[in-house]
Amino acid sequence: MFSDNAPVGVVRFGGEHYCITEAPFLHKINTNTLETLTKIDLHKELGINSHCPNPHTLKDGTTINILHGVGATGPKYDVVAFPPSPLQGKENVFAKPQKVGTVDARWKLNPCHMHTFGLTERHVVLLEQPLTIDVKAMVANTIRDKPFIGGMEWMENKLVKIHLLNRETGKEVKQKAKCERFFYMHIINCYEKDNHIIIDINTYDKPDLLYAFHVKNIRENGATMGNNLDGGKVKRIIVPLEVPDKAAPELNLVMLAGQKATAYKQKDGSLLLTPEIMTEYSYEIPTLNPAYHGRPYRYFYGSCGNLKLTTGKLGKVDMETREVKEWFEEDLYVTITYFIPRPSATAEDDGVVIVTGLHSNDRRKVTLLVLNATDMSELARVVFATPSDVPRSLHGCFVSA
């Protein structure tokens, strides 16, 4: 059903680097030569259909990810932990991951598309959005040799369902919560504060941008199609963890000072959440100080989602003041960014942001920038040419020599 092409990103499992995508295939690579060393088929290894291409690697080298499979009651999302190194007698870390917990998909023939998930110090955060994989259509398209995207269905009138799993017990938080409808690819960060879980995320009204990038459309309308696409927004969702049994329906249960997100208890006991809009546009492929992953933070960096611009802008978003400081240069399109803290730094934004940029006037030219993460000023750059055209990057990683 799936291609084994793995273009989404490069990630670490067990200290090794693998190319990854939603399909259950991984390609181990030599980071010096970029040679493919071996292919891992997780469908054969673990019996899964797909997985999340943005796993979380912890400080000890353990990698947590979401595996999508089929259980006795239908589609499910398994939260698993891959060890820092292969278990004794095993060739790789994928042989027998530790199960953290399981969530059943809410639609038995339409599991949702889940590109990222959140991780706080105590919980795993899964968002079931209304962009789903229509199993019947997917099987039919496979037989007809049609593209994968043709088997996806946008459930226009459905909300986003939020699942919270306790990392220690593997049990799902009993309090049910749903949020207004949106499409998303990337969760920026999640953390806990005063018995609330805060979820910061890049959102869009609909998944139209996924359908825009057919080769035919790019060739015929590439110069102008961005004018009609949703630029997205950064939104903040807040889930209260303590909900009084007799909470009045008109009482906003978000009790954090300075926050505008809301949570109201419904007749069935569930929570209906409304996010706060934090920025005018999305800031994609987000990066932040790694010491603040899953913890209260203030800043993150990402590429501006305003596709009306011919130049890709890099934004530093202040989640406390809601202000954005942007960096851009004519004819340079920002792709992958990564924050590196200064050794012994005490301030959250004391460090550098490494940026790769492509050039609209030369498809074989690449610029690597080093920006001061505090004020977004340029510290250094190197420009080089490649033997062939350079495609737009999705995710990547920087490896020290």
Image (tube, rainbow, N blue to C red):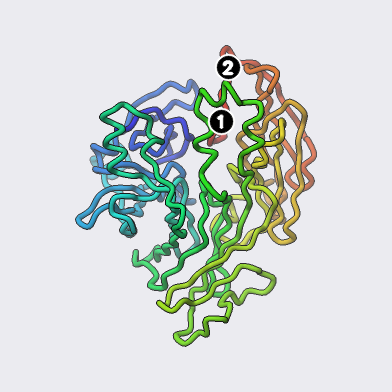
Mark 2 burial class by Cα count in 10 Å: few <14, some 14-19, many 20+: few
Q: Which residue is drawn at 53% across and 47% down?
A: 206
Image quadrant assignment for residue 144 = top left
Q: Distance between the residues labelled 2 and 1?
A: 12 Å
Q: Where is residue 108 in the image (x, y as percent from the top left)?
A: 28, 54
Please state which of residues 37 and 191 is positioned toward the viewer in this rendering: 191
Mark 1: amino acid:
Ser
Please state which of residues 92 and 104 is positioned toward the viewer in this rendering: 104
Q: Residue at x 39, y 50 (%)?
A: 112
Q: Which residue is drawn at 63% across and 47% down?
A: 282
Horizontal relation, residue 360 to residue 4: left or right = right
- Which mark is drawn over residue 121? none
- Which mark is drawn over residue 389? 2
Mark 2: amino acid:
Asp
Please state which of residues 139 and 286 is positioned toward the viewer in this rendering: 139
Q: Name the residue under label 1.
A: 393
Please state which of residues 399 and 25 is positioned toward the viewer in this rendering: 25
